[in-house]
């Protein structure tokens, strides 16, 4: 089978935090088969808010394309646990925000959903198996029901018991899409259903970091933790999960978008058929979106064999009325129903990537907040509100492909988040083929802090701030980039000016900052060491100025050094070598399970030794295989002999695991 795949652009398919071929080149970044056979299939896809068509990327270089393990992100020591970026990336989206983002990288969203068109049904099956009975399943299928109607389905499961006590995770995520276009090209219908059910046990970190070197705990799964000691561990069944002390987040979104175009009909006449064409001048668009969000943390007493670690709540959350035989429960539930109408105008009917767009949206918001702090205290309350906002957009990807202009804005006129706004403008220009593309832009956002900072939220444990009115966050972002596909280089620079930045500190306390700024410079480059031996580098330097609660590593550098080639075998793409990530010392954010937030702390400095992985990735036609040894840097011979217990700490009291052996495969085939 031959699948026509290719790299689909540097900025679209290689966000910061991922390795990859710049401009799609390199031996590992494209298929070696370029001729057609009877079983050849062509797959295109687009995103909801873009008419540009892409093709699937067959690169084998970056594991982050398959697993949520990006090189510039850290998790709490087990895949599926709370995670955050090492690169400062504030939220720039105005309007309603529930406030929970520690599990964002595991959630399927509408924005990154792809709508496909395929000449034949296509299925891809993926399976990873790793140390400690970790399992990962990925199933994807797409087919055209008719030439003008496609549907796709994706399912992903993450089940990982973890290295330490009460650290198991179990995530189930689903995505269903439909893309219909009428035969006369005037009408389009997009449907999306995305649902994510995330479950993660929370152990609060280990009690004493020095015990990592103790011979008493040579089996690290017996190390005492702050929450959930002596609980029954995961059975390893990927379709069941036992979470007694932990987090369960569930998000579901239904979206339907309809578009109807007015414009000029045309056609192409061939010897055997007439192919209808349509050039739009005006587009009417209607979008319905219904989303449900459930955020829960619970620590449940269920038998004398397990009682709550009440000292944790007293010490870190200053909750002194929690008895070991009580249950601790926090829950925020939200529904968001939005109704949007937009109008497009196309100045050039033959260039659908140039348009003006105006629209208005009504959001209906319902929040239910449920709190249980002891066996005798239970409260529940409800909030109903709405938002009305207007939005506008202009895009122009010129027909000569030299200019790319984007401008967009949103203003909240009434409701819960009245006064919020965001504005964005970006200009990108092809200077010359040798110099490459230069982009510059500006954005500003004025936004209400996430609702978790509101006193009505059941997760708001800071009684001193529950009646405090937080001001709107204001963020200014100025950015520029230089992309040179011929030299496989991308250089970006960003400047952030922050006012009223909302944050947590000391496990549960809430506050807002004054004015501070952050400067970032990022370089992504591929070097040729010798023939097929490559060095891919992704390095970010960032510096904070002003009275800032944000602590950042000055330097984050992810490097991949290895061989890319095929040893003369025509159908083989092979890549093997080592990955090295360096994070300079800094005061890493702590994590508070009870509120589901990373928080700023000033007492512990993280000294992070380089992370080292060994990898072997290969592709043979439609089969892709991965074999990896991760966290090799944990190898040590002292103080208790040979072993992998020299753990790095990703957050205070949260060590990364020792050696992880990971094996995986992906197989794509035509049905």
Image (cartoon, rainbow, N blue to C red):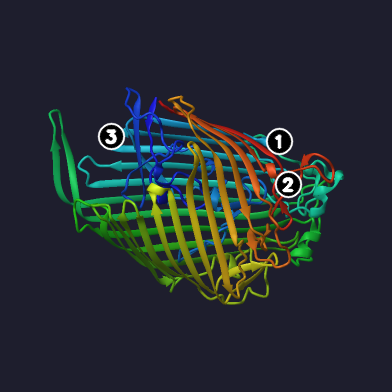
Q: Is residue 207 above or below residue 358?
A: above
Q: Residue lying at the far right in this picture: please name it.
A: 216
Instruction: Please indicate, yes or no, whether residue 61 appears anywhere in the rendered image.
Output: no
Q: Please give the label number shown on residue 147.
A: 3
Instruction: Using residue 330 as the reference point, say whether residue 11 is left or right of it.
Output: left
Crowd around label 2: few <14 · some 14–19 · many ≥20 (10 Å): many
Label 3 vs label 1: CA separation? 46 Å
Measure the C-alpha gap from mark 3 to mark 2: 50 Å
Find residue 166 and name its label. Answer: 2
Depth check: give the residue in front, 303 or 15.
Answer: 15
Q: Which badge, 2 or 1, is on the more N-terminal residue?
A: 2
Q: CA distance from mark 2 to mark 1?
A: 12 Å
Q: Secondary structure at mark 2?
A: loop
Residue 272: where, in percent of width, then height? 14, 28
- Residue closer to the observer: 665 or 34: 34
Residue of label 1: 235
N-terminal-most mark, 3 or 1: 3
* Spot occupied by residue 415 in the image (x, y as percentages of width and height): 44, 71
Q: Nearer the viewer, residue 582 or 352?
A: 582
Q: Position of residue 349 (x, y in %)?
A: 19, 53
Specify whether 399 is left or right of 570: left
Q: Is residue 174 above or below residue 620?
A: below
Q: Is residue 328 visible?
A: yes
Pointers 2 and 1 in contact (CB under 8 A)? Answer: no
């Amino acid at each position: 089978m031959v699948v026509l795949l290719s790299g689909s652009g540097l900025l679209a398919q290689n966000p910061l935090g991922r390795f990859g071929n710049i401009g799609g080149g390199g031996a590992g970044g494209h298929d070696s088969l370029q001729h057609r056979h009877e079983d050849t299939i062509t797959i295109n896809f687009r995103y909801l808010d873009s008419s540009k068509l892409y093709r699937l990327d067959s690169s084998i270089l970056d594991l982050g394309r398959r697993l949520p393990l990006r090189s510039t992100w850290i998790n709490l020591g087990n895949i599926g646990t709370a995670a955050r970026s090492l690169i400062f990336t504030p939220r720039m989206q105005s309007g309603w925000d529930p406030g929970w983002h520690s599990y964002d990288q595991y959630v399927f969203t509408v924005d990154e959903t792809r709508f496909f068109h395929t000449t034949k049904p296509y299925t891809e099956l993926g399976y990873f198996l790793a140390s400690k009975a970790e399992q990962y399943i990925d199933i994807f299928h797409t087919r055209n029901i008719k030439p003008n109607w496609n549907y796709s389905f994706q399912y992903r499961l993450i089940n990982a018991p973890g290295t330490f006590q009460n650290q198991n995770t179990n995530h189930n995520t689903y995505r269903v899409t439909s893309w219909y276009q009428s035969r006369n090209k005037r009408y389009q219908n997009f449907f999306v259903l995305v649902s994510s059910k995330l479950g993660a046990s929370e152990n609060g970190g280990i009690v004493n970091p020095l015990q990592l070197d103790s011979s008493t705990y040579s089996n690290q799964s017996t190390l005492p933790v702050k929450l959930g000691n002596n609980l029954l561990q995961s059975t390893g069944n990927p379709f069941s999960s036992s979470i007694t002390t932990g987090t369960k987040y569930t998000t579901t979104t239904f979206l339907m978008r309809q578009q109807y175009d007015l414009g000029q009909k045309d056609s192409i006449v061939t010897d055997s058929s007439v192919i209808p064409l349509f050039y739009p001048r005006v587009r009417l668009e209607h979008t319905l979106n219904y989303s449900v969000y459930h955020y829960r943390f619970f620590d449940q007493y269920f038998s004398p064999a397990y009682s709550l670690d009440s000292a944790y709540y007293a010490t870190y959350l200053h909750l002194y009325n929690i008895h070991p035989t009580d249950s601790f429960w926090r829950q925020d539930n939200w529904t968001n129903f939005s109704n949007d109408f937009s109008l497009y105008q196309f100045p050039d009917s033959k260039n659908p990537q140039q348009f003006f767009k105006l629209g208005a949206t009504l959001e209906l918001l319902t929040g239910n907040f449920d709190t249980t702090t002891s066996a005798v205290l239970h409260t529940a309350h409800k909030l109903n509100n709405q938002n009305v906002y207007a939005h506008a957009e202009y895009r122009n990807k010129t027909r000569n492909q030299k200019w790319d202009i984007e401008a967009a804005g949103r203003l909240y006129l009434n409701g819960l988040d009245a006064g919020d706004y965001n504005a964005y403008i970006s200009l990108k220009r092809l200077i010359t083929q040798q110099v490459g593309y230069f982009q510059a832009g500006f954005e500003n956002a004025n936004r209400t802090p996430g609702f978790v900072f509101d006193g009505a939220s059941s997760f708001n444990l800071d009684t001193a701030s529950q009646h405090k009115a937080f001001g709107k966050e204001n963020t200014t972002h100025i950015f520029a980039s230089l992309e040179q596909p011929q030299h496989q280089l991308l250089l970006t620079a960003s400047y952030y000016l922050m006012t009223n930045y909302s944050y947590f500190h000391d496990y549960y306390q809430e506050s807002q900052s004054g004015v501070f700024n952050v400067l970032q410079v990022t370089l992504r480059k591929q070097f040729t060491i010798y023939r097929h031996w490559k060095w891919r580098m992704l390095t970010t330097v960032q510096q904070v100025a002003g009275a800032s609660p944000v602590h950042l590593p000055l330097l984050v550098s992810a490097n991949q050094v290895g061989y890319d080639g095929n040893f003369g075998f025509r159908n083989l793409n092979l890549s093997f070598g080592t990955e090295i990530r360096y994070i300079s010392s800094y005061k890493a954010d702590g994590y508070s399970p009870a509120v589901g937030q990373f928080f700023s702390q000033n007492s512990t400095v993280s000294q992070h030794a380089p992370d080292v992985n060994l990898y072997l990735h290969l592709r043979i036609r439609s089969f892709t295989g991965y074999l990896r040894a991760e966290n090799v840097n944990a190898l040590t011979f002292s103080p208790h002999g040979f072993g992998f217990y020299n753990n790095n700490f990703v957050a205070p009291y949260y060590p990364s695991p020792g050696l992880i052996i990971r094996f995986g495969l992906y197989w794509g085939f035509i049905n």
